[in-house]
Image (spheres, rainbow, N blue to C red):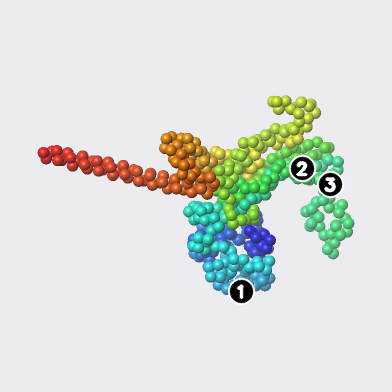
């Protein structure tokens, strides 16, 4: 996916995932059997050393037996697919089906692309053993030092560089003035015994239904997405699924429903008896993959990423009132008596459309409604992730704090070791945290040793005094 020009969908997605396995999946996620680790592995294990079901758990406990490799393809692959030399063996998907185009060659993974090209898929274990990371400090920290990233997150949570986000799906159905539109369901399923359709016989009028429908958006963004939990129980990007806000115009031209947000039955999606707002944020794989991952700060210091809304949901809170863009007084009152709202109010929308949860843990819209494990980040995850105040913890005193801080800052200026860019800043903080760890251990030990030595000397002198 990082080589869009030459990479094809079927290079990753198997024939079973695309064409089905004989069962009807309730949602797209249920059909997908490929996971990132199927080709890339983890820093500690090659793909063939991982158990089946890794990254595809759905809350189901699996075994730890290595999945291995195979030289045997499925019958459908042998019949319809290009058959490649297995060499050391075909790799398995997370669900135990062979990839007909992905083979093991020594400790390398070779992908035979439908484009006609062959790619070597970098395995994380090789990168770790060879120390051939593109950005060693970030990669080793994120994937080797903080193991929970691999255990609890989808790889594309960090490696998806951006996601398209269309907030607010405004649907307007208009029955006024005898408006009509094609009934696409009826049109698609209607045909005569000889195969003729309404379209081939110029009978389109039979396929019309009353009313027309059109759709619009509140706003659109192409940037780092919100994070949530998907049906597999892993932390993942979430984007607007269908945040439907409905307006219906009757046959007489009067508004029957205006900017209505529908709710689920009571008790669903962590709601009370009134139900949850049915404006869904859905887990997604954005397919904007890059070897360079998101910066740590894009998650750990960004309230939108945590589910609190753009800028923490601070600004976009006026949906429940009509929005006017007209001549107004200083206190916001319209000067014209004929002013029309540019954006009619949306009742039951007191927050930004990108917000899925409040800081005290109240869910405010559905998240991945198809799956029981889907939802916002848990209270524990959000509190553990958020590190907005880290900068202030140092710079509230640096460089003009107490005498020791002032002296250190002055010495840094004289010696030319004041950090001027991000890498130098990271290096300085890393050195400081090591010194802090040492002093927290060494100083108490030194104090304890001094106290013990003082006690021993005191006892010794006391004994000498008594002997005299």
Q: Height in image: 245 above or below 335? A: below
For label 3, count other residues whose C-alpha is less than 10 Å away and answer few (under 14), some (14-19) or many (20+): some
Report x, y in % for residue 459.
19, 41
Q: Are the two marked residues, 1 and 2, in contact with CB atoms closer than 8 angstroms?
A: no
First in sequence: mark 1 vs mark 3: 1
Crowding near pointer 1: few (<14 within 10 Å), some, many (20+)? Answer: few
- Residue 180's label in the rendered image is 3
Residue 283 in view, yes or no: no
Could you classify mark 2 by the number of other residues whose Cα lies within 10 Å: few (under 14), some (14-19), or many (20 or more)?
A: many
Image position of 306 with respect to 105: above or below: above
Q: Secondary structure at mark 2?
A: strand
Residue 324 percent location from the top left of the image: 74, 32
Say whether marks 1 and 3 touch (CB < 8 Å): no
Q: In the rendered structure, which disc, 2 or 3, sits on the residue that comes first in sequence?
A: 2
Which element carries disc 3, helix, strand or loop?
strand
Disc 2 from disc 3: Cα separation: 14 Å
Q: Are marks 2 and 3 in contact (CB under 8 Å)?
A: no
| Residue in the foreground of this view, choosing between 10 and 21 | 10
Figure check: 86 above or below 156:
below
- The mark nearer the N terminus, 1 or 2, is 1
Q: Which residue is mark 1?
A: 85
Residue 172 — which label?
2
Q: Mark 1 to mark 3: distance in Å? A: 57 Å
In percent of width and height, residue 33 lies at 61, 61
The residue lying furthest to the right in this view is 202
Could you tell me which residue is drawn at 71 percent across and 39 percent down?
A: 260
Which callout, 1 or 2, points to the residue nearer the camera?
1
Give 448 or 236, whichever is nearer the viewer.
448
């Amino acid at each position: 996916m990082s080589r869009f020009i030459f990479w094809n969908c079927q290079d990753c997605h198997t024939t079973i995932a695309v064409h089905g396995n004989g069962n009807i999946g309730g949602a797209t996620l249920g059909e997908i059997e490929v996971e990132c680790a199927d080709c890339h592995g983890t820093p500690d294990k090659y793909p063939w050393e991982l158990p089946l079901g890794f990254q595809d758990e759905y809350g189901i406990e699996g075994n730890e037996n290595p999945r291995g490799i195979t030289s045997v393809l499925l019958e459908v692959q042998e019949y319809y697919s290009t058959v490649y030399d297995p060499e050391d063996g075909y790799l398995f998907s997370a669900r135990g089906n062979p990839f007909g185009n992905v083979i093991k060659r020594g400790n390398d993974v070779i992908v035979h692309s439908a484009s006609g090209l062959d790619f070597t898929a970098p395995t994380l274990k090789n990168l770790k053993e060879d120390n051939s990371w593109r950005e060693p400090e970030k990669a080793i920290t994120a994937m080797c030092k903080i193991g929970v990233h691999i255990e609890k997150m989808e790889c594309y949570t960090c490696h998806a560089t951006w996601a398209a986000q269309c907030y607010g799906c405004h649907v307007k159905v208009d029955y006024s003035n005898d408006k009509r539109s094609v009934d696409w369901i009826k049109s698609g399923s209607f045909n005569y015994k000889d195969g003729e359709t309404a379209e081939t016989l110029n009978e389109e009028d039979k396929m019309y239904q009353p009313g027309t429908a059109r759709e619009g958006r509140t706003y659109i963004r192409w940037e780092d997405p919100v994070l949530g939990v998907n049906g597999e129980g892993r932390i993942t990007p979430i984007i607007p699924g269908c945040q439907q806000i409905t307006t219906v115009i009757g046959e007489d031209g009067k508004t029957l429903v205006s900017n209505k947000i529908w709710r689920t039955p009571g008790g669903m999606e962590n709601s009370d008896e009134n139900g949850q707002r049915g404006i869904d944020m859905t887990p997604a794989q954005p397919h904007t993959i890059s070897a360079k991952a998101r910066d740590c700060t894009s998650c750990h210091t960004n309230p939108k990423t945590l589910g609190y809304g753009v800028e923490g949901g601070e600004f976009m809170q006026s949906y429940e009132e009509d929005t006017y863009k007209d001549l107004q007084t200083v206190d916001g009152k319209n000067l014209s008596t004929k002013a029309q709202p540019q954006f009619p109010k949306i009742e039951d929308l007191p927050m930004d459309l990108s917000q899925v949860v409040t800081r005290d843990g109240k869910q405010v819209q559905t998240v991945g409604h198809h799956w029981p494990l889907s939802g916002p980040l848990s209270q524990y995850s959000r509190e553990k992730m958020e590190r907005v105040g880290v900068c202030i913890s140092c710079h509230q005193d640096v460089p003009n704090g107490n005498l020791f801080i002032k002296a250190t800052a002055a010495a840094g200026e004289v010696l030319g070791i004041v950090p001027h860019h991000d890498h130098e800043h990271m290096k300085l903080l890393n050195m400081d945290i090591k010194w802090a760890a040492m002093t927290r251990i060494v100083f108490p030990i030194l104090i304890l040793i001094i106290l013990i030595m003082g006690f021993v000397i005191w006892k010794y002198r006391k004994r000498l005094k008594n002997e005299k």
